[in-house]
Image: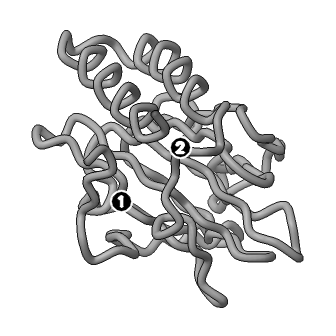
Amino acid sequence: MKNERLLTFVQGMSRLLQSDPHEPLILEQGGMLLADLVKYDDWLPEAFARPHPQFYQQYLLYADPLDRFSMVSFVWGPGQKTPVHDHMTWGLIGMLRGQEVDTHYFKKPEGGYRRGESVILLPGQVGSVSPSTHDVHEVANFYSDRPSISIHVYGGNIGRIQRHVFDPDSGQEKNFVSGYSNDVIPNLWN
């Protein structure tokens, strides 16, 4: 069943995090679980795949009751992108539909951020972010004429974590909490 795919992923992540593993193991094994989910594009309901004409959408799919992880669908309208930002926790990015450009930024000793390599994520591929390796990036829809959708999993409730956006030239930061685009927490496996 299509909705079983999401339930299987959530159960797998819950079992993985139950033993409080080190982050490299979370990124490796959680990445494999996410890759198993995003290799199929038949399970995400339309309500969590709708683009907005002006702003990318972050739809909550699952929030662990112990705040061990959360899961969202990011829906990118044509040409939409994030500001340069951080996460303050580990994260996994699984490409479901379309393509997305993930550009890393690195703090310069003299201030500001240096633009690093850009990676294009294709459907079925998984990337990661982490404060211990590379937490600051900008994400953009590869396409200027159609939406793209990625599934993100974070080590906490990302809609409640205080994070930062950065001006890459000056390094000036601004605090923000992203929240979610949907008003209701879904139960996708009913």
Q: Position of residue 50 (x, y in %)?
A: 57, 74
Asked whether 65 or 120 is in front, the reply is 65
Q: Pick out the residue farthest to the front.
A: 1
* Horizontal relation, residue 67 to residue 125: left or right: left
Q: Position of residue 104 (x, y in %)?
A: 70, 47
Q: Position of residue 130 (x, y in %)?
A: 49, 35
Q: Is residue 149 above or below residue 20?
A: below
Asked whether 71 or 68 is in front, the reply is 71
Residue drawn at x 65%, y 62% is 112
Mark toward the viewer: 1 or 2:
1
Give SS at disc 1. strand
Asked whether 24 or 122 is in front, the reply is 122
Asked whether 92 or 90 is in front, the reply is 92
Number of the label disc, if any, that sits on residue 60: 1
User: How many tags in the picture?
Assistant: 2
Q: Amino acid at mark 2?
A: Asp
Q: Which residue is mark 2?
A: 135
Tell which circle, 1 or 2, labels the residue nearer the N-terminal end: 1
Residue drawn at x 30%, y 44% is 189
Mark 2 neighbour class, 10 Å CA radius: few under 14, some 14 to 19, many 20 or more: some
State the image quarter where residue 49 is shown.
bottom right
Give SS at disc 2. loop
State yes or no: discs 1 and 2 in contact (Cβ < 8 Å): no
* Horizontal relation, residue 188 to residue 108: left or right: left
Q: Is residue 122 above or below residue 28?
A: below
Q: Pick out the residue farthest to the left.
A: 66
* Horizontal relation, residue 64 to residue 121: left or right: left
Q: Position of residue 182 (x, y in %)?
A: 35, 74
Residue drawn at x 19%, y 10% is 19
The Cα–Cα distance between marks 1 and 2, rounded to whole angstroms, is: 21 Å
Q: Amino acid at mark 1?
A: Leu
